[in-house]
Amino acid sequence: MTPVTEAIPAVRLTERINRIEPSATMAVVAEADKLRQQGIDVVDFGAGEPHFSTPQHIKDAAIEAIRGNFSKYTAVGGTTELKDAIIQRHAADFQSEYRLEEVTASVGGKHGLFNAIQVLVEHGDEVILPVPYWVSFKDIVGYAGGKCVLLESDEALGFRITAPLVERLVTPRTKLIILNSPANPSGAVMSPQDLTEVMRLAAQRGIWVISDECYVYLSYTGQRFSVGSLREYRDRLVVVGSLSKTYAMTGWRLGYALGPAAIISAMQKLQSQSTSNPTSFVQKGAIAALKGPQQCVEDMRLEYIQLRDHVVKGLRSISGIRCTLPEGAFYAYPNIASFFGRGGVKTASDVAGKLLREAHVATVPGEGFGTRDHIRVSYAASRVELDRGLERMRKFLSAL
């Protein structure tokens, strides 16, 4: 007798989860890991994290917290000691002036951005988002029910964002402008003047600004600037930061937000129903990072400048590649459009896919960042590793 099998009904997912896609960068990480599990040597230019180890004094503080049984719940937005450390660090570096009720800590900077966008953006609201954009911005806005209005920047001008470019896209439905300087993936840095003019425009039009300053300490222009220092515009501003890139603490998951007390309170209410507090002993490590010696931050920044110059020179030496000089973060964003039509590749995703599967170099295709002609190359790696990857790219692309 043939056994009777019941059809399994299709799972009906919510409309809001179907508005978003998996992170493009995480997809590359997953595919690269599969190849490594097969014993394949992959050069990883896809990872968006420092290659440095977390400084020892930060690790020691977290270990001491564990030994001291600092392992209970804390306040949702972090301890008072942590909040005070965030405020003091930002004030010392950017001459800002925030109060305890205007700061909250989160499980990484991405979590802070998610919370901020969810409490600010309603269904149908428009959000001005410069292109290229960090992969998660568009999906987080979509999850909130908002609509991204894309601001196309000029590669020839280093992907510069200015107030006139923003103003052309403002409509009565504009609720929010998202800024990211230094930017992921382009490495573009907005000048203090451009940032100030965008903030002035937003204030005049009653528009909110979220400034993602994850890479604010990794600027190579000689000017380190936070819009949080513009006290006259703080009523319409949420600054989101992270310890991940600044202190090589990506896996620790500790971010923060600075903004009006009402917005911070709403973000903490949302967080209270999702993750609750950031990990208790991680908060102790974060306090050590923020209040301790800062030479480690400058040492990493200086090495990134050397690595940037090295990788951009290497990329530009590959026939067919054009690459602007990034002014911050730790990514190069080379234009690889000249290879389309060769060897069966038609898109940046094709190029990145073949680079990974055939040359065993992990990069992230530009489609995830809103452009069609680029791939993202992380130079947060040793010079030896950069050279290995560049040579593989050279051989592969020259054979297309």
Image (cartoon, helix red, strand yellow):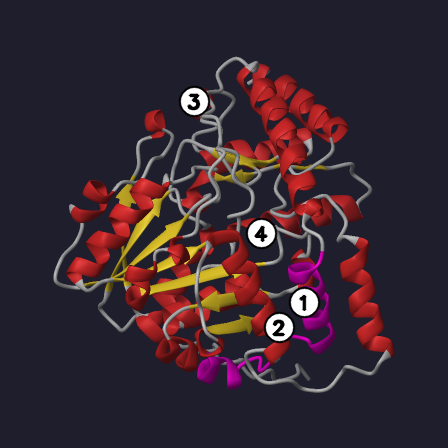
Which stretch did the figure color magenta?
A: 268-292
- Within-10-Å neighbours for mark 1: few <14, some 14–19, many 20+: many
Question: Cα distance, mark 3 to mark 1?
Answer: 52 Å
Name the residue nearer the viewer: 66 or 231: 231
For the residue marked with disc 1, what is the amino acid? Ile
Task: Say whether marks 2 and 1 touch (CB < 8 Å).
Answer: yes
**Apparent side of residue 118 relative to residue 27 in the rendered image (left or right):** left
Residue 375: horizontal and vertical position, in percent? 50, 34
Q: What element carries label 3?
A: loop
Residue at image mark 3 = 341
Residue 400: horizontal and vertical position, in percent? 55, 18
The quadrant of the rendering that contains the N terminus is bottom right
Name the residue nearer the viewer: 14 or 220: 220
Which labelled disc corresponds to residue 82? Answer: 2
**Apparent side of residue 393 relative to residue 13 in the rendered image (left or right):** right
For the residue marked with disc 3, what is the amino acid? Gly
Name the residue nearer the viewer: 209 or 19: 209
Which labelled disc corresponds to residue 27? Answer: 4
Q: Is residue 319 above or below residue 107?
A: above
For the residue marked with disc 2, what is the amino acid? Leu
Name the residue nearer the viewer: 364 or 324: 324
Task: Say whether marks 4 and 1 touch (CB < 8 Å).
Answer: no
Q: What element carries label 4?
A: helix
